[in-house]
Amino acid sequence: MSELVTGEAVALELRPARLPSRALAVLLDLVVALAVYVAVTIAVVVSTASLDEAAQTALSIATFVLVLVGGPIAVETLSRGRSLGKMACGLRVVRDDGGPIRFRHALVRGLIGVIEILMTFGIVACIASFVSARGRRLGDVFAGTLVVRERIPVARTGFVPPPPPWLAGRFSELDLSAVPDGLWLAVRQYLTRMRQLDPQVGWSMAARLASDLSERTGAPVPQGVPPAAYLAAVVQERQAREARRAFGSDAGQGAPSAAVPVTHGPVATGAAPAAPRPAAHGQSESRPQEAVSEPSGGERPAGSPGVPAGERPGTGFVPPA
């Protein structure tokens, strides 16, 4: 199993396909390709019966190359590594880093597959798959690809339990840059399987992982905090940092600063600070507002801002009359 650790301390488990499933998928692809090749060959022979022998030979070679070589390349490129046989067996061709393949990967696999599968009847491909640690044939080695299983049981994926509520945000100042991905993966695997372990064994493993993590961060484990809770809290802090980095948290932090000019602006000087005074001094504050907002004709239009201070908006903004 090949594992890649993301920023959320999640392991991408790439399970290489075994030789029997890959052989079955290749066999199904060959059956389909040969059926299409026979049908196309019959159509070409019937339609080119009036041509000379050289033209028929050239068309036969072109049909072989297009159907048995170009066909699988086009199918793998358009389906992102899933041919008909691989779809039936639950397999997919991916890059070494787990990403989808492109045309150049499918082209290299298809061209080398002509030699190690078609011309040698799959003997070279079987030997290369036996020798390779991840079951790759020569086409996968030169193309930088890997055939993996897509159908993985859901029960194998673990759930990382959350830390206690009283530890939320307590480790926001830790420096997590020196923690390697291997340690994050070990912590995550322990948290997902700690309920299946013996209590004493689980406690010792948690203490050892917490000690390693504290050495990497440069801060000791707080007194009174269980090792498992400490690990869960640090993992949650890392996930929160990655989420803020991915989605951005500057918008939420900039909201309070945007409200500061409202209370200190030139119009808001008589709104929020003088709000309690109308109760003690009557209508001492409503008259200046009437002078600002009342039209020159002396009549107050309906819905004008010259209303008592208790009914005005709290922002202090006076709309035009």
Image (spheres, helix red, strand yellow):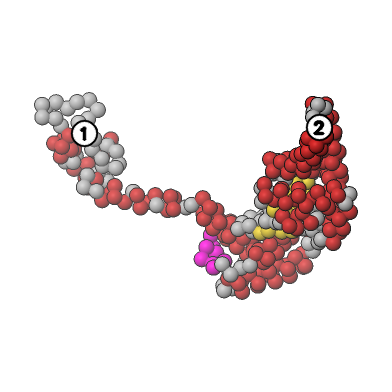
Q: Position of residue 196 (x, y in %)?
A: 78, 58
Of the image marks 1 and 2, the number of the one nearer the N terminus: 2
* Residue at numbered disc 2: 52
Badge count: 2
In this rendered view, identify the residue nearer to me: 280 or 98: 98
Q: Position of residue 90 (x, y in %)?
A: 79, 44
Identity of the residue drawn at 25% across and 40% down: 317
Mark 1: few, some, or many residues within 10 Å (few <14, many ≥20)? few
Query: Where the C terminus falls, by quadrant?
Result: top left
* Residue at numbered disc 1: 320
Whether residue 254 is visible here, answered yes or no, is yes
In this rendered view, identify the residue nearer to me: 40 or 147: 40
In this rendered view, identify the residue nearer to me: 293 or 244: 244
Identity of the residue drawn at 81% across and 32% down: 52
Q: Is residue 37 above or below residue 209?
A: above
Asked if residue 170 lies in the magenta stretch, the reply is yes
Q: Of tags 1 and 2, which is closer to the observer?
A: 2
Asked where in the image residue 85 lies, by quadrant, the reply is top right
Q: Position of residue 54 (x, y in %)?
A: 80, 37
Q: Main secondary structure of the magenta part?
A: loop
Magenta residues (range)? 169-176
Asked where in the image residue 11 lies, by quadrant, the reply is bottom right
Q: Is residue 193 above or below residue 60?
A: below
